[in-house]
Amino acid sequence: MAIVVVIDASAAYLQRQGLDNLADGAALYGADLGSAGVYEQGLGDGRLIQQEAAVEAAVRDYLARADAGSRFPGIDVGVRVDPIGRSVTVRLEAPLDLPLTIPGSPSNPTVGASSTAAVTLVVR
């Protein structure tokens, strides 16, 4: 039983790390390409304003290029733009593919990750 727990815990950890990496990259990509408002508002000091549609498109594009759907079948993606903090948060959740099962364990476990990013300008 202990071996099964260690194997499943290791598999869950590795899958979460993979989702963490995807969420980090997607948030950074979305924040970078979603800050197109710089052309309308100009360069100021501080964080750039995020355009929600551009952020959403950039995140979806990043995940498609990273082949997230094949690596994590059934992945659920959530994208949130914070207009006050001028940041982008990407939340990913996918079914957890465990190599072994323990009787009584959840039948459909999931693993999730989230990441937040912003583009900050420092004018010198």
Image (tube, rainbow, N blue to C red):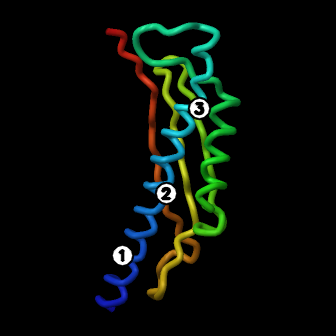
Figure quadrant of residue 46: top left
Nearest to the observer: residue 16 or residue 33 = 33
Residue at the spot 57% in from the left edge and 24% down from the top edge:
35
Residue picked out by circle 1: 9
Q: Mark 1–mark 2 contact, CB under 8 Å?
A: no
Judge the density around disc 3: few (<14), some (14-19), many (≥20) Cα neighbours within 10 Å. Answer: some
Secondary structure at badge 1 equals helix
Judge the density around disc 1: few (<14), some (14-19), many (≥20) Cα neighbours within 10 Å. Answer: few
Residue 41 left/right relative to 12: right
Q: Mark 2–mark 3 contact, CB under 8 Å?
A: no
Residue picked out by circle 3: 33
Q: Nearer the viewer, mark 3 or mark 1?
A: 3
Q: Is residue 60 above or below residue 5?
A: above
Q: Which mark is residue 37?
A: none
Residue picked out by circle 2: 112
**Location of the C terminus (image quadrant):** top left
What kind of residue is marked 1? Ala
Q: Position of residue 6 (x, y in %)?
A: 31, 82
Q: Earlier in the sequence, mark 1 or mark 2?
A: 1
Residue at the spot 35% in from the left edge and 76% down from the top edge:
10
Q: Position of residue 85 (x, y in %)?
A: 46, 21
What kind of residue is marked 3? Leu
